[in-house]
Image (cartoon, grey):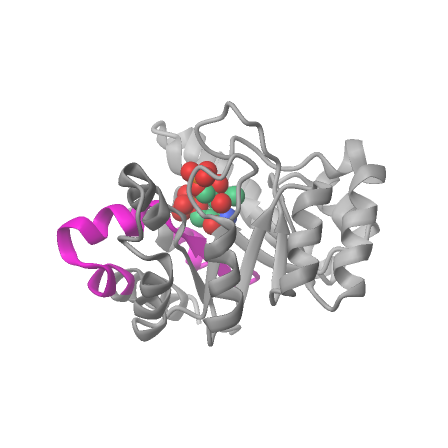
Amino acid sequence: MKHLRLGVNIDHVATIRNARGGVHPDPLRAARIAEAAGADGITAHLREDRRHISDGDITRLAHELTIPLNFEMAATKEMLEIALSHKPHASCLVPEKREERTTEGGLDVAGGHNSLQHYVDSLKGADIRVSLFIEADPKQIEAAKNIGADIIEIHTGAYCDMEDPAQRQAEFERIQKAAALAEELGLECHAGHGLTYGTVAPIAAIPTIVELNIGHFLIGEAIFSGLEPAITKMRKLMDDARQAVA
Ligand SMILES: CC(=O)[C@@H](O)[C@H](O)COP(=O)(O)O
Ligand SMILES: NCC(=O)COP(=O)(O)O
């Protein structure tokens, strides 16, 4: 059974910092705590509007982290230049709409692959692993393979938000099939967005998923329990779910 990695997304440490300006709380300090608590990597999304993570945060993370950095970025010239200057372990291309509250869906790789090809090639040319954040849709997964992505990250937001059990089960099965297709095509499969203690186990039990990226819930939970205990608990829920299917 493949090891299931946990990437801790620290964006919302920066959200809290930015509410007052200044330097507290520091996302890099959160990243170090995450590592001590068993995170395998750190994810940070430098949004075009800089609503949370800043350019300075990315510089510090890229230079000071001892675990891999997954740099989430829109497919823009500005972000590409930043990625190429820091050479993170991986870059995950995500769709971005300035007015959205959070990432609402996946990239349309199948419909717009010509525009993404340049970004995939440039990042890979700099030895940066390329991930595409997409919906659990076979068309998108095949398109990701065709443009040379190394990884897909399946958007789990809809699965997490669905309240109707039948609908959630249907979305879960779509994710399960998508993860199997990714493996068949030789793509590494990650998943994330909106995952919580309550929703993580079924996703963690999908054997062809090798990494989960989790942020907003963990940072919120850290207010009540502390960051290290919140991550330790998430890690245990993931490991227990994985063990149960081994
Ligand atoms: C792409 C993704 O799922 C995360 O980076 C997420 O977007 C971060 O949080 P916000 O959407 O709130 O910026
Ligand atoms: N790519 C998903 C991610 O990094 C974390 O999303 P969330 O847990 O903050 O919703």
Seen in the picture, residue 146 relative to 48 is either above or below; the reply is below
Q: Residue at x 36, y 57 (%)?
A: 27
Spot occupied by residue 120 in the image (x, y as percentages of width and height)? 77, 53
Spot occupied by residue 50 in the image (x, y as percentages of width and height)? 49, 39
Instruction: Give the magenta part as a residue range.
Output: 202-231
Spot occupied by residue 58 in the image (x, y as percentages of width and height)? 51, 57
Along the horizontal axis of the image, is 184 left or right of 113?
left
Q: How many marks?
A: 0
Q: Residue at x 41, y 66 (%)?
A: 242
Along the horizontal axis of the image, is 28 left or right of 67?
left
78 and 72: which is toward the camera: 78
- The answer to whether any part of residue 180 appears in the image is no
Is 156 part of what is drawn in magenta? no
Magenta span dominant secondary structure: helix
Res. 225 image quadrant: bottom left
Along the horizontal axis of the image, is 27 left or right of 213?
left
162 and 243: which is toward the camera: 162
241 and 114: which is toward the camera: 114
Spot occupied by residue 233 in the image (x, y as percentages of width and height)? 24, 62
Seen in the picture, residue 72 relative to 102 is either above or below; the reply is below
Q: Residue at x 22, y 49 (%)?
A: 221
- The answer to whether any part of residue 96 appears in the image is yes
